[in-house]
Amino acid sequence: MKIRIDNILLGTLWLLAVTLGASFWFNTIFGFNILSVKHWEYVSYLQAAKTPINSMFYVSFVITVFVAILGLYVLIRPRLRKIRLPIVRISNNKPVQTSQPEKNTQTDASTLDVTKSAEIQKTVPTAPSVPQHITVRPPRLNLPIASNMSTPVINKQPTNNTFNNQPKPVAKEYPEIQEIFASAGYTVKKNPIINGIKTALLAIGSDEVLWIGAVGIKTTELRAMIDKLSQVFSDTLDDIYININGFVLFAPDEATAEFQNILMFNSITQLKEYMETRKNPTLPEEEKDNFDAYSEYIDTVINYIGKI
């Protein structure tokens, strides 16, 4: 609907500009006012009486009509939206195995003896020379331990492996939230992981509307997720704005939340009552192709944003 209103306003403005230009041209060259009914009646009398009229009058009229129609076509012609999809480059570099030169097995005995002796000299460290004026400390004596002495008990502390074996928390799915938006007419998408946080909902609607929600996180974390999505949209879209709406259920920072544009709910019932008055408008037939392209683009962004 917004696109139609823009086309109507642009077409009206263009027709007014062409009319003013034509009026100025005919008044200056032929002394004819195209907005006057009497002048058109005078032209009709001349044509009925077969009085010759300057041929430039008809040529100017044809050119004016052609310019008006051409301008309307340029302004109102259907345009396909250009969406630049992000490209994920995955390197397929494989480690190159270098072939080692084969050793010559046919060696004589003298060469083998020299080689082995050289390797033994390299592996056995030579004892450092001690100056004569420095006395050498005698080796430490290994005294036997008395049997009546009790050995100290060392308390072993738990290693990090005990913590690693604990089960990690699994991101919970919320099908009741997805059902609320599906019943409201929105298209529910796969829940992506953004900034290491699993979302509870991601749904799209007509007029490039996107809803994103989470449960039990701070509003600052959801704001960072929205900013990341907005950055991806601005980098990959040309002249298309996507309106992102965000909400959080059971936000721990509800009392000190700074972002007024993020909705907060204390129960799923509150979210359901809120969405009952904000259902997705019915999509016209001529907008289905654009919505399908928008839906495919969001699917690509979901797969892309989970890899960055």
Image (tube, helix red, strand yellow):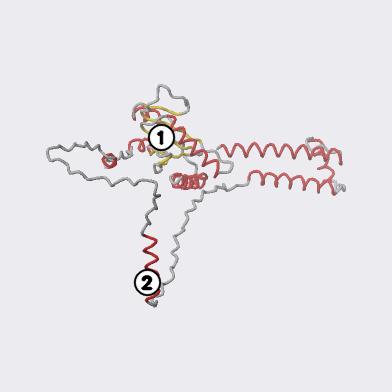
Horizontal and vertical percent position of residue 159? 27, 40
Three-letter amino acid code at disc 2?
A: Asp
To which residue does mark 1 refer? 213
To which residue does mark 2 refer? 113
Farthest residue, direction left: 148
Q: Secondary structure at mark 1?
A: strand
Horizontal and vertical percent position of residue 218? 40, 29
Identify the residue at image location x=35%, y=37%: 179
Q: Nearer the viewer, residue 149 or 199?
A: 149
Q: Nearer the viewer, residue 184 or 175?
A: 175
Three-letter amino acid code at disc 1?
A: Gly
Q: Nearer the viewer, residue 294 or 75?
A: 294
Farthest residue, direction top: 255
Q: Nearer the viewer, residue 114 or 33?
A: 114
Identify the residue at image location x=44%, y=30%: 220
**Could you say which quadrant of the image residue 153 lies in?**
top left
